[in-house]
Image: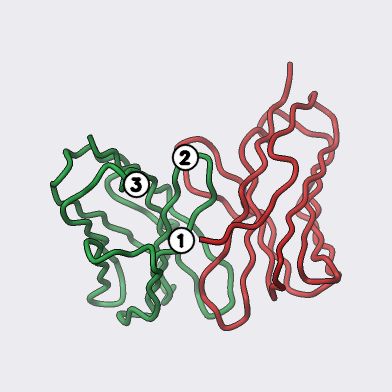
Amino acid sequence: DTGVSQDPRHKITKRGQNVTFRCDPISEHNRLYWYRQTLGQGPEFLTYFQNEAQLEKSRLLSDRFSAERPKGSFSTLEIQRTEQGDSAMYLCASSLARDSEQYFGPGTRLTVT
Amino acid sequence: GQQLNQSPQSMFIQEGEDVSMNCTSSSIFNTWLWYKQDPGEGPVLLIALYKAGELTSNGRLTAQFGITRKDSFLNISASIPSDVGIYFCAGQLRGNEKLTFGTGTRLTIIP
C-alpha cells in the first residue's frame, strides 16, 4: 500500500494559464476526494467521486474547475484561466467505503503569479 | 465554507509537557477525526471516533467524541519534538462524504 500520491507537488503558473493536477488514490479505494487549503485554514471540500462518477460538487468549484476520474482509478483536477485567488494547496484523499476514514496525499501547491 | 472552531489557536510548550486541545461545532457529527499536518505536506490521520462518548488512544495520543456529538478533544501526553505541527479536527455526517475541518491548533515546542 503506497498511499495517496499527487503530481506535481508544486506548480507556479501565470494568471490566465490552465493547469492540471493528478491524484492516484490508494489502490482498491473507490472513493476519491479533492479539497483546497489556503494559508492558515483547514482544508475545504471541493468534490468527490465514487468510482468514475462525480457525485458531489461544492459551491467553491467554479465553472473554471473541472475534475475527472475516467476509469475509476486516478483523477485529474483542471483549473482554466487561473486567477491569483486560486493560489492554494490542492489536496486529494481516498477512502475504502462510505463513512470510512479519508487518507490524504501530500498535496499540490499552486502559486498563480 | 463552514469551519469548526478549534482551541487554542496555538500552543507553546516545553518538551515533556502534556497537551490538550478541543474542537466545537454548532451542528452534530457522526464521526470525528483528528489529523496532523506538517508544513508543505498533506494531513495525516491520527485518530478516528465513531460513537458519542468514545475514548480512543493511539500511542501517546488520546481523543474523545463528546457526548453532545458537537465537540471532540485531543490530548497528547509527554510531548516530543516530532509532535510539532498543526492539528486539525474534522467532522463527518453519516451518509455525507465531505469532511468539515477545524481551523487548526499549531503546536510549537520551546527548547
Q: Which residue is mark 1?
A: A1
Q: Which residue is mark 3?
A: A108
Position of residue A106 measured from the top left corner of the image (x, y, whole percent): 42, 47
Tell me: B93 left or right of B61. left
Instruction: Specify the colour of chain B.
Output: red
Q: Secondary structure at mark 2?
A: loop
Q: Residue at x 81, y 53 (%)?
A: B62
Name the chain under label 1. Answer: A
Q: Residue at x 84, y 63 (%)?
A: B55
Viewer-proximal residue among A47 and A16: A16
Mark in front: 3 vs 2 = 2
Residues at marks 2 and 1, CA–CA distance in whole angstroms: 30 Å
Q: Secondary structure at mark 3?
A: strand
Q: Is residue B62 above or below residue A111?
A: below
Q: Secondary structure at mark 1?
A: loop
On residue A39, the disc is 2
Task: Please report whichever mark, 3 or 2, sits nearer to the chain's N-terminal start.
Answer: 2
Task: Please report whichever mark, 2 or 1, sits nearer to the chain's N-terminal start.
Answer: 1
What's the residue type where badge 3 is placed?
Thr
Q: Residues within 10 Å of mark 2 (few under 14, many from 20)?
A: few
Q: Residue at x 33, y 64 (%)?
A: A61
Tell me: B108 left or right of A101. right
Viewer-proximal residue among A38 and A35: A38
Task: Please report whichever mark, 1 or 3, sits nearer to the chain's N-terminal start.
Answer: 1
Chain whose colour in the figure is green: A
Q: Is residue A71 above or below residue B71?
A: below
Viewer-proximal residue among A113 and B58: A113
Name the chain under label 3. Answer: A
